[in-house]
Amino acid sequence: MLLFPTTKRALTAMAAGVTFAALIVGTSPSTASAAQAIRVKSWGDNPFGQLGDATATDRHTPVTAAGVTAAEVTAVSGGFNHSLALLANGTIEAWGHNADGQLGDGTTTDHPTSGTVAGLLSVRSIAAGDDFSLARLGDGTVQAWGDNDFGQLGNGTVGPDNPLPAPVTGLSGVVAIAAGQDHGLALLANGTVKAWGSNSTGQLGNGSVGGNSPVPVTVLGVGGVGVLSNVKAIAAGDNSSIALLNDGTVRTWGRNTEGELGNGVLSPNSPTPVTVVGVGGVGVLGNVKAITGGGRHALALLNNGTVRAWGNNGSGQLGNGITGPDSPTPVIVLGVGGTGVLSDVALIAAGDIHSIAYLTNGPVNTWGSNASGQLGDGTTTDRNTPIGIRTGLIGITSIAGGGNHSLAAA
């Protein structure tokens, strides 16, 4: 894309085999002290309090999200200007921008510290869209709240917004969720995918382009043949969608102007899934165990602990040592400072124009746009290769990228 700091964006994070477009389950928390008081760190853009530190001041190094200290945090997710944290007791804490009710507390008042999402007690995973939020419950259903201008709440109507959680129509047996800018995805236990909300670039994958679907539709197979199946993880970009199959290959659909589909061409958009090709366009990308979507770029974590990236590279968010041009084929993310290849990666996440990785030996690495300090290195200098930062957390279990902010939880 040409992603700008003011561009709207949702986002998600993922790790080892479990999706989230937001949900990350990775490194065992057993290494963390049971007495650890700090559960969530955040950094970057903060005009609406999305860092949760009780201020509206951008932070160029990690700060503590106030209020999320009493219980274990199992996942975090970043919307464009709001943040979510899933607690081990099945409740959700939310903070930041709330003009569309995306914090789920029944109001439209911004909150620079965390508050509890109303009425949800058995949540298993979370996903934050630009200005809406999703929660998967233990019974396999999905709740949604916030902005509904494109039917992204999936309740059968386009508008109005809803500041309280309500069911997404007709969904059951859901095992994972993801949220894009204005669309939602659900992975079912049978390995198929449902999508709803905006379909401006074909991101719902049902063979059509344009309009909105306020109820879930089924994502079709490659080229519109049959139904996409054998999916084990999902993720979403702004206006694109990503699926990881059981065989370790990746399918994408939706917007492709900056190569965010990774199929070797910069356009056109695709209203049905296409296959992500290998590095340099050779063969098919395989051996993938986790995926995540940024604004208009995507990341894939391979079984060997290295990362591939494709799509928009205007701020160096592909991590290949170059700022621009965009890449419609996967590139290899380099190591810190461009030395070697980034390896030993356990978790990946992406914001609008930046990328995040958590390594098995402890450090968090970031790269891409840093205009708001979202890389957490104490500067506002963009980076086209990873840089290591210290979060102060022990045993990180989840990372996430918001619009122009970042989150980590332990």
Image (cartoon, grey):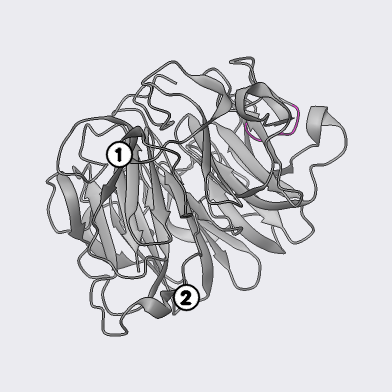
Q: Is residue 206 magenta?
A: yes
Calculate the distance from the C-alpha at mark 2 to the C-alpha at mark 1: 27 Å
Q: Quadrant of residue 171?
A: bottom right
Q: Which residue is mark 1?
A: 404
Q: Quadrant of residue 340?
A: top left
Which quarter of the rendered picture does the C terminus lie within? Answer: bottom left
Say whether marks 2 and 1 touch (CB < 8 Å): no
Q: Nearer the viewer, residue 346 or 216?
A: 346
Q: Which mark is residue 17?
A: none
Q: Position of residue 21 (x, y in %)?
A: 52, 50
Q: Position of residue 147 (x, y in %)?
A: 43, 43
Highlighted range, magenta:
203-207
Which quarter of the rendered picture does the N terminus lie within? Answer: top left
Counting residues from the start of the chain, the first of labels 2 and 1 encountered is 2
Amino acid under disc 2: Gly
Q: Residue at 29% x, 70% y: name it.
A: 39
In this image, 295 relative to 278: left or right? left
Q: Is residue 189 magenta?
A: no
Q: Residue at 23% x, 49% y: name it.
A: 43
Q: Residues within 10 Å of mark 1 (few under 14, many from 20)?
A: many
Q: Residue furthest bottom?
A: 34
Q: Nearer the viewer, mark 2 or mark 1?
A: 1
Q: Is residue 323 visible?
A: yes
Q: Which residue is mark 2?
A: 90
Q: Is residue 181 above or below residue 302?
A: above
